Image (spheres, rainbow, N blue to C red):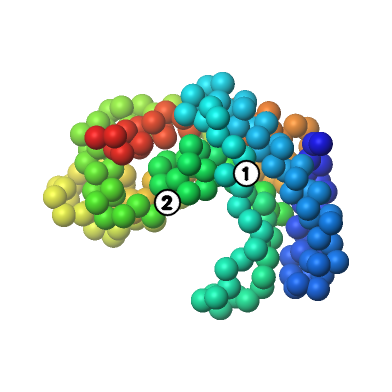
Amino acid sequence: MKTNAKEIFDFLKELTVNNDREWFHAHKAEYDELREAWILDVQRLIGMMAEYDATLKGVQASDCVYRIYRDIRFAKDKTPYKTYFSTVVARGGRKTLKSCYYLHMQPGDAGLHGGIWCPDRELLAKLRHSIDDNIEEFLGIINDKEFTKRYRFVSESLKTMPKGFPREHPYAEYIKMKEYLVSHNVPDSYFTTGDWVEKAAADFRPLMEFHNFLNYTFDE
């Protein structure tokens, strides 16, 4: 079974305007079929990516894809379903704390993303010092042409330099970041025409060294 991504996008568009349990229940069989095929395609994506990123060998798509059901217990928005399909690609799946690949299929807001989101204070301090201590290596990774033609930083940043770093640091923009996230936004047609799995596998490849650099901090 292979995902027809256009059918996924059509389903998600309908869900966006009918985000209630009655509509979803009536279309549950359609959703289940799309999700089953989607998981198989994510597994195919992992297999292609494992050819260049050995950390992904043996990773199961079922551990990586997110549920469509929203946790609305403390949310102001009480709509019960997410209006996108998404997956983390990493050892540890969606529970990983490390830098990872993330794919998001949502009408009008699709993309490939990567990095570390919302690290705790101790890890963030280590990441900042790792970047400062190895700035030439870091710059070489993020300024690589294959990286820059796809990805841009979307991280939130402090207004001032964190304690322990000079105010006039030449690479302050990276030291002030609160997280290390990059994004490659794509049109819906990226997924709905051609083989999106092959395209995503190729476009994720420039992120591997970025992940390796950030994840080295976990092994120190």
- Residue 140 against residue 118 in the figure, above or below: above
Q: Amino acid at mark 1?
A: Ser
Residue located at (75% from left, 45% from top): 36
Q: Is residue 192 visible?
A: no
Position of 14 with respect to 198 (left or right) is: right
Q: Is residue 70 above or below residue 173?
A: below
Percent x, y for residue 179? 37, 50
The residue where tag 2 is placed is: 117
CA–CA distance between discs 2 and 1?
21 Å
For mark 1, what is the residue? 62
On the image, the x and y values in percent for residue 218 come to: 31, 39
* Residue at disc 1, secondary structure: helix
- Which mark lies nearer to you, 2 or 1? 1
Q: Is residue 36 left or right of residue 207?
A: right
Q: In the displayed structure, does residue 118 sit left or right of residue 147?
A: left
Residue at figure coordinates x 57%, y 44% from the top left: 63
Position of the N terminus by quadrant:
top right
219 or 83, nearer to the observer:
219
- Residue 15: image quadrant is bottom right
Tell me which amino acid carries mark 2.
Trp
Q: Quadrant of the C terminus?
A: top left
Query: In percent of the image, x 52 and y 30: which residue is there?
Result: 56
